[in-house]
Image (cartoon, grey):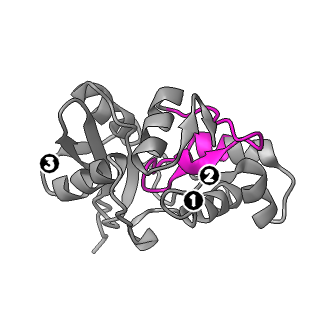
Amino acid sequence: MKSISIPDKIIISTYKTDKLYFSVGISSSTNKIIGISIPQDKLNESVAEISSRCQEYEISNDYIETAKNISRIYKGENFTFDLEILDLEVPKSKNIKSVVKTPFARDVLIQTSKIPFGEVRTYKYIAEKLGSHAYRAVGTALGKNPFPIVIPCHRVVKSNMKIGEYRGGSEMKKEILENEGVRLKGYRII
């Protein structure tokens, strides 16, 4: 008897705080997180950021606690996730698009995950830890981070200690850093 392949789909759960939506997408076949949205002020934008990665998705409250924990990190709680629940592999399913496309991007994300709560590192530091001088490539990989907040790309700053860009905007990056107790003057770490 020929086996039937069931297409992978994403289960999306969303948690709303006072003003922001936090969405998380879980692969139905691996039970791993394949994406986290940047906090959004509109539900449809939060869901769309994840649903665009898969042809099939379902909205469910099954993982609302995970989305809630992400909001706790955003608000400044020192909450850590086990990297084992994140799908850091180059995609195997044809149905799910991943932004972790290269081993270098995966290594950048893993190195970034090691930055302690309330501290920052530079793009140069991350590159050097990987034995590279590709500082801009580190920035590019972090700009495509599918796990914002959980993999704390907001803790990576320029060598001149300016906070730099963030997919959610510089103001959001500043807010997250301040929530963690990082001292800033304007958009520069002090």
Q: Which mark sits nearer the N-terminus, 1 or 2?
A: 1
Q: Residue at x 57, y 42 (%)?
A: 144
Image height of 87 relative to 189, above or below: below
Q: Which mark sits nearer the N-terminus, 1 or 3?
A: 3
Q: Main secondary structure of the magenta part?
A: loop
Kindly give the residue lying farthest to the right in the view shown: 133
Tell me if residue 134 can be seen. Answer: yes
Q: Residue flagged by tag 3: what amino acid is it?
A: Ser
Pinpoint residue 91: horizontal percent, then vertical percent.
52, 57
Write down the residue under mark 3: 60
Q: Which mark sits nearer the N-terminus, 2 or 3?
A: 3
Query: Would residue 106 appear left or right of 6 to someone viewing this image?
Result: right
Q: Which residues, given as a range, are shown in magenta? A: 140-167
Pick the front one: 171 or 134? 171
Write down the residue under mark 2: 101
Q: CA distance from mark 1 to mark 3?
A: 26 Å
Q: Residue at x 45, y 62 (%)?
A: 87
Quadrant assignment for the C terminus = top right
Q: CA distance from mark 2 to mark 3?
A: 27 Å
Tags 1 and 2 touching, CB below 8 Å: yes
Q: Residue flagged by tag 1: what amino acid is it?
A: Val
Tell me if residue 9 can be seen. Answer: no
